[in-house]
Amino acid sequence: MAPENPFGEVLEDVRSIPPSVLVIFGASGDLTRRKLIPALYRLFHEGRLPASFSVIGNSRTSFSDEAYRQRQYEDLQRFLKDTPLEEEEWQRFAKRLFYIPGDMKDPALYQQIGAKIDALSGDTPHEVVFYLSTQPSFYPLAVDMLRESGIHRGAAKRRVVVEKPIGHDLESANQLEEHLAAAFDESDTYRIDHYLGKETVQNILAFRFANGIFEPLWNRRYIDHIQITAAESIGVEGRGAYYQEAGALRDMVQNHLLQVMATVMMEPYTRFAPGPVRDERAKLLRSIRIYKPDEVLSHSVSGQYGHARVGGEDLPGFREEEGVHAEAQTDTYAAVKLFVDNWRWSGVPVYIRTGKRLPKRVTDVAIQFRAAPKNMFAGRGEQDVAPNLMILRIQPDEGISLRFQSKRPGSGMRLRPVGMDFNYGSSFGTRTPEAYETLLLDALAGDPTLYIRQDMVEASWQVVMPILEVWRNTRFDFPNYAAGTWGPAASDAMLAQAGHAWRRP
Ligand code: BG6
């Protein structure tokens, strides 16, 4: 099917998706309103959902189908981007939304859901995706209840999608896994990391493995170091209570940024298929050096933002946010210096940083190449000859750029860095699908390539656990950066120690 999208370009689906029912637990929550329903609506608008497709939402709040639809309509008006919300089309979409209120502890709820799935399926067995988007503490219960009710199995495939966080630490991740494994095969368990669904992150694979010219340079002989930045200008946006327990290292590094790192640094796979791609990702994650406690503080920096006045606006410090303890030791900024101990990457530092209330929203990966072996132009640059830099821009302003030296016009040999730039928007002239569109469609199609396998979850926790533990036993002098700045000075010092410096994106 090759439907038109509103920009006139074509978004193609090469797969056919079977008749399906999507059951969302946590259907009145934030993720459902902001991400899942808008993603489904866009897929519907573009004709990318199967002809027979329904959503069953559940949460404790009592709504009729009608009231639930009305609420989704209001939320779509707020959160739907790049897609028109027209009455006639909305009415056709709304007919596919159903709602069953109920307590996840109540076995009767699952019987009702099962009966609804049967009614919606009619004579054609429908595949079912159970999407867990509740508070994470309910995941084990939901999975157990699905298993006990028997609705985790059916005449057609039934799968489960689990939202992040997958555990609060290695131990709880393993406990959750016991519940999941008792109910679903690994191949039917889809752990989401929405960064893997971002077009620009997927494009890293195309960039590396569909071009012959970059991969020969992609190793310790040519690359000096790598910087991965995920900066957010927002604060904790009403999620103070959750975030206080999580912190930046858990919230962003353990999952999203280690996955980005694996995508940039993994070995080529033999075939673009779930098994080989995920094997390589997992192998890379397992090759990241795990620090001993006495190595942690020289390889990591924890930060927390304090109050500041920026552009005439008063930005509260983290400890002044709603739901946050006045002496919270939470990291709202985390930076780590990692190494991948394998032949390709031995000795190449990988710096990762992320934080709330930084000066701007930007996520990118900067690959800094080694300098030319001899500088024949000493003193002729605006700075000394700057090394080549490749920037994979994940968001916003999606694209890839390469910095190299050029001669400045005029007499004499004076140099300046210039850039070659690929820009997603202008090259394809189409809207970029949101990560949740891609990932929902993949789950419905039964394609787990961009989902996380349990061995990847474990490997990532193994990397961050020693850091979390040392941080937990350290009393940091917080706040240590002002809202609207690039994080604590200690972070600059960590790079300076190896002669490096953070880029200012
Ligand atoms: C979520 C984190 O997983 O990712 C949030 O819990 C963060 O704290 C968000 O803001 C960032 O996602 P994106 O897609 O906006 O970069």
Image (cartoon, rainbow, N blue to C red):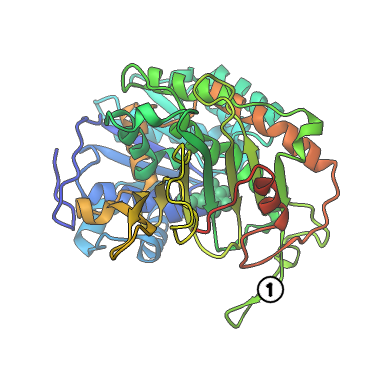
Residue 68 appears in view: yes
Ligand 1 lies under 8 Å from the Cβ of mark 1: no
Instruction: Tell me if 479 is positioned left or right of 335 in this view.
Output: right
**Residue 199 against residue 406 in the figure, above or below:** above
Q: Nearer the viewer, residue 255 or 42?
A: 255
Which residue type carries mark 1?
Answer: Ala
Q: Which residue is found at the position 59% from the left and 36% from the top?
A: 349
Q: Which residue is found at the position 52% from the left and 37% from the top?
A: 224
State the image quarter where residue 296 is shown: top right
Say which element carries label 1. strand
Q: Which residue is found at the position 13% from the left and 55% from the top?
A: 8
Residue holding disc 1: 308
Q: Please state the horizontal and vertical placement of residue 485, each as a whole percent of the image.
A: 62, 65
Instruction: Tell me if 335 is positioned left or right of 96 in this view.
Output: right
Q: Please state the horizontal and vertical placement of residue 275, each as a whole percent of the image.
A: 40, 18
Specify the quadrant that holds the N terminus: top left
Q: Nearer the viewer, residue 4 or 420?
A: 420
Q: Please state the horizontal and vertical placement of residue 370, each as a whole percent of the image.
A: 48, 38
Question: Please, which residue is most extreme toward the bottom here?
Answer: 312
**Residue 347 against residue 1 in the figure, above or below:** above
Residue 104 appears in view: no
Question: Please, which residue is most extreme toward the front here?
Answer: 412
Q: Please state the horizontal and vertical placement of residue 37, each as a whole percent of the image.
A: 38, 51
Q: Which residue is found at the position 60% from the left and 25% from the top?
A: 459
**Residue 444 against residue 355 in the figure, above or below:** above
Q: Residues within 10 Å of mark 1 (few under 14, many from 20)?
A: some
Instruction: Tell me if 325 is positioned left or right of 237 in this view.
Output: right
Q: Nearer the viewer, residue 189 or 297?
A: 297
Q: Nearer the viewer, residue 203 or 498?
A: 498
